[in-house]
Amino acid sequence: MAGLRSAQWYAGDDRNAYIHRAWMRRGLPDSAFTGRPHIAIANTASDFTPCNAHLDEVATSVKQGVYEAGGIPLNLPVMSLGETLVRPTAMLWRNLAAMAIEEMLRANPVDGVVLLGGCDKTIPALLMAAASVDIPAVVVPGGPMLTGHFRGAPLGCGTDVWRLSEEVRAGTLSEELVLQSESSMIRSRGHCNTMGTASTMACLAEALGMTIPGIAGTPAPDSRLLERSHATGRLAVDLVREGRRPSTVLTRASFLNAIVALAAIGGSTNGVVHLLAIAGRLGVDLSLDDFDRVGAKVPLLVDLQPAGRHLMEDLHRAGGLLAVLREVRDLLDPQALTVTGTPLVEHLDDARIWDDTVIRPRENPLLDSAGIAVLRGNLAPDGAVIKPAAASPELLRHRGRAVVFDSIEDLHARLDDPALDVDETSVLVLRGCGPKGYPGMPEVANMPLPEKLLAKGVRDMVRISDARMSGTAYGTVVLHVAPEAAAGGTLGLVRTGDPIVLDVPGRRLSLDVTHEELQLRQSSQQAAAAYAAPTRGWERLYVEHVMQADRGADLDFLVGSSGDRISRESH
Ligand code: FES
């Protein structure tokens, strides 16, 4: 028993050990408390998180694997976040979930943990928590849902919702027909089946080395997910026996590998914020510029919505993430380990592309360079990001007049006003939607286009915001502007009519207004003060401590790992 963290609860003959064992026995044999690793299954299953509702079944397979390998599996239901329901945005609660999971792992007799996530914020929160406690940990991504169809055509979650709703607003599709498609989109258990944030984070968890290789993207209803969950349970016991902790897997090398993966799969811009936050928990030196520097030379190989055509079920059939990574093997750090104890690159030998219309070979990419571009300039001194793969090529260099909206409500109230002074060359600016301003940095940066322009056939415009964007969205959208308007950023000083210059190849984002004029506006502006500070509860704590997007929007006091220290006895 010596050496196990749980021994500090269970070993010995004193009254406290008696209490700990007696309450936990419930049919367990004596051997459960004499040297067998206790493995928590941090389970984000919830009926309010439909993407994760099947994780109890996954947990059963994990449990069987843990038992088989000699461990004791223990269900640990943890805070869950359903992307489509939670208000004002699931991102407001990511750090709360991470903090709660971290503390429950530390407070309990846990030797190792299997992290069950799926919907957008759940895998990031689980990884942030595990990184902070730094006990042996492995992720099981819950997997995407199967492809839904409507009138013979596939429906991609999220992406097709945005597309269909724009078609309705443009008058090219009836509302009645769209409503008929509602029950067709979510065909099965699992998370969104586009290369949205959930799929991206599952792939990044694998690229980071935090899953058994080959599991990411296994569809939720596929029996192989249960087989791999069983194997993950076994592995969790080995992790404890070998003392392999997240800090041995999550090195700078593995984060750089994840950036390569993010680019090659055409992953969500949310991946940037989450990777920065996870790295921050471990003290790994990772910056926004690493995404541009490392990602810029990576080709886009995966033809999935929103950047392309297919869906996650197709990616899995075509060979999955390992087949993608094999194509860019030379860009991966050969030293970066996985939870198996062997480097990620060693798991690529047997990977194959089975359908090269879904996974393109290196010599025939969808785009030569797919990385997320990091823009700077007086409008974003600390950076802003854009996903060129999801943007219109002709808008990547653009100069246009700003049309400013102070909030998402302001946008909804005025966007379709026929009198709004806007044309297709305008630049839509939405502010007040950053971490502090909203609060929580919602996914509203992919603003809808004005109805009168949609009717003219316009389908994309330059849009700029301090918000995030759904990983399922597309368009020429500059987001994560830092500092945000509510933190005193220049974004708060923009006025309608100001010229804005976007130069993605040159990595610039500028407000073409003189420095003197901006200083004048700064001294008279009330913008930052206009964002009412929450007075109580989590929102208050969040707004007082949240960092900007370029630091992963984590709380400042959660940066750095505090380890698995065991606190004083409860009685
Ligand atoms: Fe859960 Fe998209 S709503 S992954």
Image (cartoon, helix red, strand yellow):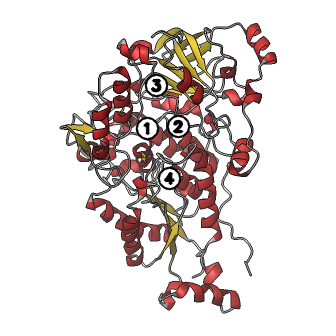
Residue indicated by mark 4: 122
Callout 4 amino acid: Thr
Callout 2 amino acid: Val
Look at the numbered disc 4 and give the secondary structure of its residue.
Answer: helix
Residue indicated by mark 3: 448
Real-space Cα distance between discs 3 and 1? 26 Å
Quarter of the image with the C terminus is bottom right
Mark 3 / mark 2, whichever is N-terminal: 2
Find residue 41 and report its horizontal and vertical position in percent: 48, 67
Look at the numbered disc 1 and give the secondary structure of its residue.
Answer: helix
Callout 3 amino acid: Pro
Given this view, does label 3 or label 2 mark the residue nearer the observer?
Answer: 3
Callout 1 amino acid: Leu
Q: Residue at x 46, y 42 (%)?
A: 258
Look at the numbered disc 2 and give the secondary structure of its residue.
Answer: helix
Q: Residue at x 67, y 50 (%)?
A: 560
The one nearer the camera, 108 or 443, is 443
Quarter of the image with the N terminus is bottom right
Real-space Cα distance between discs 1 and 2? 9 Å
Residue indicated by mark 2: 272
**Vertical comparison of 381 with 236: above or below:** above
**Vertical comparison of 213 with 531: above or below:** below
Real-space Cα distance between discs 3 and 2? 23 Å
Name the image quarter holding residue 407. top right
